[in-house]
Image (cartoon, coloured by chain):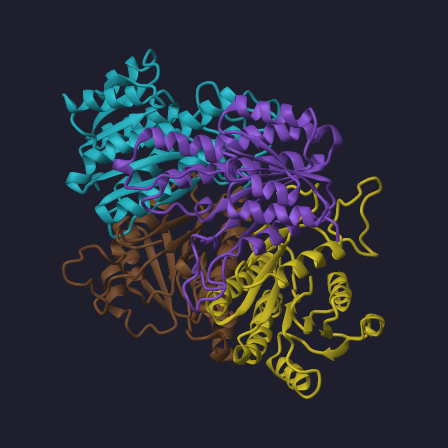
Chain colours: A cyan, B brown, C yellow, D purple
Amino acid sequence: MAVGFNSALIVGAGSGLSASLARAFKGEGVKLALAARSTADLAGLAQETGAAVFTCDASKKSDVDKLFGDLDGGFGAPEIVVFNPSYRTRGPVAELDPAEVEKSLMVSAFGGFLVAQQAIKRMLPKKRGCIVFTGASASVKGYAQSAPFAMGKFALRGLAQSMARELHPQGIHVAHVIIDGGIKSERRQEPAGKTASMLDPDAIAATYLGVIRQPPSAWSHEVEVRPWVETF
Amino acid sequence: MAVGFNSALIVGAGSGLSASLARAFKGEGVKLALAARSTADLAGLAQETGAAVFTCDASKKSDVDKLFGDLDGGFGAPEIVVFNPSYRTRGPVAELDPAEVEKSLMVSAFGGFLVAQQAIKRMLPKKRGCIVFTGASASVKGYAQSAPFAMGKFALRGLAQSMARELHPQGIHVAHVIIDGGIKSERRQEPAGKTASMLDPDAIAATYLGVIRQPPSAWSHEVEVRPWVETF
Amino acid sequence: MAVGFNSALIVGAGSGLSASLARAFKGEGVKLALAARSTADLAGLAQETGAAVFTCDASKKSDVDKLFGDLDGGFGAPEIVVFNPSYRTRGPVAELDPAEVEKSLMVSAFGGFLVAQQAIKRMLPKKRGCIVFTGASASVKGYAQSAPFAMGKFALRGLAQSMARELHPQGIHVAHVIIDGGIKSERRQEPAGKTASMLDPDAIAATYLGVIRQPPSAWSHEVEVRPWVETF
Amino acid sequence: MAVGFNSALIVGAGSGLSASLARAFKGEGVKLALAARSTADLAGLAQETGAAVFTCDASKKSDVDKLFGDLDGGFGAPEIVVFNPSYRTRGPVAELDPAEVEKSLMVSAFGGFLVAQQAIKRMLPKKRGCIVFTGASASVKGYAQSAPFAMGKFALRGLAQSMARELHPQGIHVAHVIIDGGIKSERRQEPAGKTASMLDPDAIAATYLGVIRQPPSAWSHEVEVRPWVETF
């Protein structure tokens, strides 16, 4: 079953999840654009997946405007947009740096709005498109010592819900995927003997693609994924 | 991508969703058993999908014991079990027939327990298997005039959550799919000009299969599906 | 501030919480009836609070019918009804006794329906009354090894929600209080040096009374209480 | 029953709810400080309740620092802090002004963090205090055409949850009250013949005080209030 769309933009493309998504999109024949605050490490992935690469700090309106302007000038409007960026700072509330708290809101939530707004401006005339926001355990549970991350991720979930209620009836699918656990990477490996105890980014990407290819008669708005050993 | 399991049992097999699931399982090469309170209408589907058919009132312990005993004697223990049955009665709480309320609990929730218990007894030794419970809008929201359905579906969700927390660490995937909208059928057609305004059972089945084929490193426990036009 | 009602019935009156509620109602000048499966231990509380005492297994329709019939014949229809009973059995799902699971549903949820139905039949003509259901942590989270309790408490919450949506517009307040932690009693004392680490039943009762005295312009449907040290 | 604290600060004091809270605090003998972006309209309330009045834009760190510095210099550290401010802008996501979206996050959520941080710095040494955040329907449901309000209120709820999990074990009560409906005021009156169909601010204030006076053995973190006629 094809994914049903021809082009995708991944914002916050520097993560292992994004790399898995990029490969999955390529496997479906989807034309790909990658955007990240720093693109220094994206050259290999871009070459592997044939992706166009763009520099963009998603929390800055001028950057997001430029990203979509650049896309308009060549790549075209992406039919799928995945928003991954988040920023977190940890610590007791009394000791947090307010500038860091503000940055958490700006990157994780305001950035999501900026990207989604530009994306849907281009999707609405065609009444077609899919936006996926990447959430976390902190999207639905505010943990101690981690208020800024909860603030940003709760806010992003509020945005996703409002957009789903507004845009589903206009033909645009808005999904929010809650990643409830640590993602395996080269740096973060599973403990010996604990196979599949961390989230495999390829497996997460498969769930993203499952949501993206849902037809309008049966859309999921919110899906959570966690490893079999994760408590919840 | 194969579904990863070789056999499936659908309990409450008389619905349109079950027919779509049966066809989807057949498409994946999964050996199929269908159980329903009345099997009169299942002959065609059984022939089409090569399914074995069993009569079973899932709210009765003796029936469920017999079903799994019969499966043990030939079909074998199913690796996938989908539990669909529900019973509902509507009306103001003051006017409800208590016997009907009890039946709602017995069919929608106690039946789920009986089937799941027999299923996992056979899955646990292999530390492998997948159980999917079919929920509804009423699983997460108790509507006026519909208390018995809410009672049954809330209870089934409680069972599903407890089982996920107990059985995920033992290698058995437990999922709960919330079907939030009306399912299209021969009798219930979409209004003219409102394409995809009802849930297409084939599309729901595709989401079930997506959940079933998730590897243990990224399991979803709860997924909801609704048509693009559905308010929520 | 008076509680705004003249009479109350506590069903499942054998607990420490019920004793605290009974004393709180007496303190507000509310006439009191206590019902329990076994009334052997209620003599002292009845004397202290001036309560009428009734034997009733709330999971049995004939018992509940008799209870309300008896109330009609003397005490009168209670304006406040608190439903406390629950039954639980613990263990891995594969090892649970189905009869115990059924009993959990019958006592915790079906009993709630039976009592609430009789109560509102008498409240509806006056468009006035308050019903409070006692929930637990398991009302919103299904724990491993405790599926039957989750099934019963989830179902009771579904009933409470449906009733609130049906009956609030008819002037009857329906509330669900989630007790998230262990309740202190003579048998279950706080560890030494951990003041207030368990729920004080008098403090819970104060919250019940706060909910009961809310005017119709600002009703709470769901309130949770937990000790300051409780993780959640 | 006394409220258990001696002093309170209401931030965002210009609303009808704040006026009711101020009067309720005065009725309990609690010393009061009122802070608002504009204090022009607070003279009458200040005189009536004996409150000290402060100008403060809660979304600005310098303003919040100055507010608490001023309090330190005379009023003293407030034992109760109520945070009310919110900012909203409505419209389709494609048409929203990004500056207004940013302001929604800054006022509704970042302001809550700034105020709470200063408040708990002063409460922690005494292991005593109560912070109440004012939520809305949009705290738990993102409505179409109202994404910025959902973003701000979801974020504030995330903050409140994280703070509760961090600070409850340190003796500080953190509550989040969801106001689910329109509040009656001089400008917004109930329709004729629909008594109590809007939230009475005095009734909401009574619920706030009920939460504030809870002893640590039975704290509520989240409470919702709505009028009897409100759908939910």
| Quadrant position of residue C176 | bottom right
Q: For this view, does B18 lie left or right of residue C199?
A: left
Percent position of residue B145, x then y: 43, 71
Outermost residue to the bottom: C73
Q: Would you place residue C106 above or below residue A167 in this image?
A: below
Q: For this view, does A45 lie left or right of residue B65?
A: left
Percent position of residue A152, x then y: 45, 31
**Between D29 and A50, which is closer to the camera in this rendering?**
D29
Residue occupying image coordinates x 49% and y 69%: C167
Q: Would you place residue D154 above or below residue A40 in this image?
A: below
| Quadrant position of residue C208 | bottom right
Number of residue marks: 0
Is the N terminus of chain B in the top left, top right, bottom left or bottom right quadrant?
A: top left
**Between B20 and C22, which is closer to the camera in this rendering?**
C22
Percent position of residue B118, x then y: 51, 60
Q: For this view, does A200 lie left or right of residue C60?
A: left
Judge whether residue B217 can be spotted in this image: no
Q: For this view, does C220 lie left or right of residue D79?
A: left
**Between D166 and D39, which is closer to the camera in this rendering?**
D39
